[in-house]
Amino acid sequence: MAVCSYVERRRQTYYFRARLPGALAAILGRTHVIGSLLTIDARAAKIRAAKFYFILARHLHILDLRMRDDLRAAGLLAARDATLAQAAFELGRRYEADQARLRQHYEAELRDLITTLQQQWRDEDASPASGEAEIMAILRPPAPLDPPAGAIPRVPVEGGGPILEPASAPSPAWHTLCEAFFADRPGLTPKTLWSYNQAFTIWKGLIGDKPIAAVRRGDVKLFADHLRDKPNPRGGALHHKSILRSLGHIKSFLSWAVAAGHATDDRFGDVRGRDKTREELMAGDTRRAFTAAEQNLLFHSPLFRAWTGEEDTEAAAWFLLIAALTGARTEEITEAPAILVPVGGTLCLDLRQAGTKTRAAPRLVPLLPDLIRLGLPAWARRQAERGRRLVQPGAEPRTAAAWSKYLNRYIRKHVAEAPDLVLYSLRHSFRQMLRAANIGDELANKVFGHESGTVGAGYGRALSPQEAELVAARVRPLVDLGHLAPWHDGAGSGHGVRRLASASA
């Protein structure tokens, strides 16, 4: 019984079995190539079969080209083509001769019939000429139609005439369909498009310009094996999630190609990436929430102890506060506009354009009282007057990757040197704050930017004034931020936090 494409088990050993192309099969006198994989282990057999298929496909392609060149040189191919053409011509000529004979026979019968009718009409004083012309016009066979352009004549089967079939267009190379695939998915984010293109580039290096109609499950398995063995930039193996994501891109493309009629379904979805390693199974999520003690260290760190007058440090302090008290993703805070949106009497962070990760990511997040007290509205007005985004530190914007690198380094230096404690950990902490507020999972997901998967979540997706007020009233920071005092000068401009209150001065 076959365990996957091109692999079959014979007694206790696994064999590779693949069909040969028609031209090669005729020359070699066999329809399949079969060889032992020299293993009794199913997993090892699948791996060897995938590699065997990749090597064999290239070899057969070269062999096919050589065969055609050799046959042309010997004149055999031309002779074979001429023989087939002559046979088809002879069969067609005999068919035409049979048609002519039958036509003469039927016309004689019709002529006799017409003569009989004419005699009856004469007896009735009818006009024989018009009757004959009318009957001959009805019974005259139609003129033969010209074959359609590009039609290829086939040798007629016994008892029938020649059949014309449209010439089939050659299957395009798989990578030439990528643009059409992306055109059917206009909602993909730039980051996802980049990820797709990375996967396609790797796959093209493995299978080349293979026609989409010739792509088989072994080609997808070859890609999965490549990802399994490919090291990451830091020297270790690729993470399980990275493998599944890239493999999923190839499967999605092939699923689209099958639905569009470009490819044959070879159960591409059955191909699996490697399983999780023991370390990955035990590690779980590589990021955790801040503890209360760690958040205390963070909000007593140098960024919050003294105002230096630098825009960069001011923006960084607000970035950490917004991340801790809204749960927004790093990319969302980076792209957030400097315009706060009122929902009823509650000011909200506007992530309707910045949120792109999921369908629920575009949202409004109510501002907690601590953010209002510390002066976030004044900071936002100041940024808007400068024509900047909410946390843009200067005339030139800073990317989310740069913010993440900068603040992760800051957290390692001033909070803890822990690989699972990063900037994104503040989002984990905010989720704990939402749970502790007991506002319900549906509202918590709406504020957090997660899809709940329930039917009710599809109703009233926009944040209502009552919901915004409930979030602002119930959700509380993990630690007391009373030591942070608002700052302003006589002109009304400034940053959101200054030095610690007198107890810490």
Image: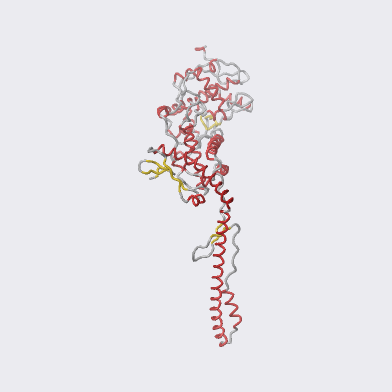
Answer with the quarter of the image where residue 399 lies. top right
* Residue 395 in view (yes/no): yes
User: Considering the image in quadrants, where does the N terminus appear?
Assistant: top left
Instruction: Give coordinates of residue 255: x percent, y percent.
Output: 49, 44
Q: Nearer the viewer, residue 291 or 199?
A: 199
State the residue in front, 388 or 146: 146
Residue 264: give x, y in percent of width and height.
49, 48
Q: Is residue 475 left or right of residue 183?
A: left
Q: Residue at x 54, y 78 (%)?
A: 110
Picture coordinates of residue 391 (x, y %)? 58, 25
- Toward the left, the furthest residue is 11
Image color mode: secondary structure
Residue toward you, 442 or 3 = 3
Observer-nearest of 36 and 424: 36
The answer to whether residue 4 is seen in the rendering is no
Q: How many marks?
A: 0
